[in-house]
Image (cartoon, rainbow, N blue to C red):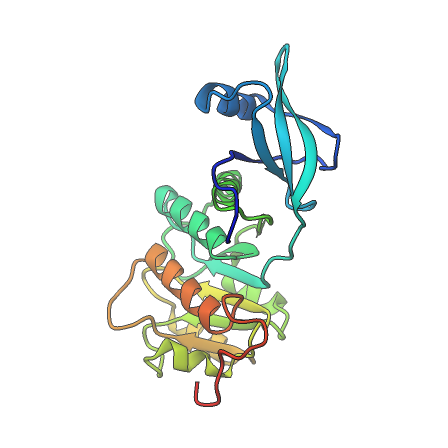
Amino acid sequence: MPGYDFRSPRLYVAAPLEAGAAVALDRAQAHYLTAVLRLRPGAGVLAFNGRDGEWAATLQARRRGASLKVGERRRPQTAPADLHYLFAPLKAARLDYMVQKAVEMGAARLQPVLTRHGQVARVNLERMRANAIEAAEQCGILSLPEIGEPAPLPRWLAARDPARWIVFCDEAAAIADPIAALHGVPPRAPLALLIGPEGGFADDERAALLKLPNVVRVCLGPRILRADTAAVAALAIVQAVVGDWRADDGRQRTDDG
C-alpha cells in the first residue's frame, strides 16, 4: 500500500461518513483515543465504516465523551475479494489469532462450520467481530467481513452456490503440491477456503466434499500444521495463485502452471 498513512490512528465507526459530519464516539472509543493514545482535541484520525471509504477526521472534545468531525475522503470504498473462509471453531485465543489473520489476508466472510471431529462447538460471534474490526483498523483495510452463524458442514454444503469453488485442506490429497492442485481453479473465481478440525475430516465428510462440482483439495506440505497456522498458509497460497494477489490482467498464470 505505497504512500499510505500508517502514523495516524485509525478507527472503525458505524455511522455514515461524509464531509462535515459529526460522529459521536462510544465510551470505549473515546477512552482509547484520549486516555490510551493521549490525543488532544484537533488531533487527526482516519475513520472508516466499511461502506463509505476512509475519511480524514479531527477529534472533538465533548462534555461527556468525544466525537469526530469528518473532513475530506482519503480513499474510496473498495469491494472485498470474493473469498469466504470456513473453519472448524478453535479455542478462544487461537480463534482470535485466526480471525485477525483471515481479515488481514482478505477474507470477505468468516463462516464457522461444525464437523465430526471438531473439539469446539460454541463460538462468540461478538468477540470474532471485535477481532475483525481490530485487524481492519490496524492494517488499513476498508471492508469488514461478514460473520456467519455456526453451521454444520452438511448444511452449509447443501446451501452452497455450486459456482463457488471450494478449496479444502486435506493431508490425504492426491497431489502433494498445493500450487499444482489449484491449477484448475479460474483466477478470481468466487472461493470458499475450508480448514477442518485438527482431528481431520471424517471419511463421510471428505467423500461428500469430493462428490461436489468445483471442489479442489490441497495438501499444505510434509508437516502437520495447527489449524491456525494452516489458515495463514492456505490463505496465502490461495490468494497468490488464484486470488487478488495476482496481477489484474492474469499474466502471472501460464499454461504450464
Q: Residue furthest bottom?
A: 256
Q: Is residue 117 visible?
A: no
179 with respect to 159 (left or right):
left
Q: Position of residue 181 (x, y in %)?
A: 42, 80
Quadrant in the picture for the C terminus: bottom left
| Residue 56 quadrant | top right
130 with respect to 119 (left or right):
right
Q: Position of residue 46 (x, y in %)?
A: 58, 36
Q: Residue at x 51, y 33 (%)?
A: 9
Q: Nearer the viewer, residue 53 or 171?
A: 53
Up/down of 32 relative to 56, above or below: above
Up/down of 191 relative to 93, above or below: below
Q: Is residue 85 visible?
A: yes
Number of numbered discs overlaid on the protein picture: 0
Q: Position of residue 118 (x, y in %)?
A: 38, 57
Q: Residue furthest front?
A: 3
| Residue 219 quadrant | bottom left
Up/down of 66 relative to 157, above or below: above
Q: Residue at x 41, y 44 (%)?
A: 96
Q: Residue furthest left?
A: 223
Q: Nearer the viewer, residue 29 or 74?
A: 74
Q: Position of residue 49 (x, y in %)?
A: 64, 41
Q: Residue at x 34, y 79 (%)?
A: 177
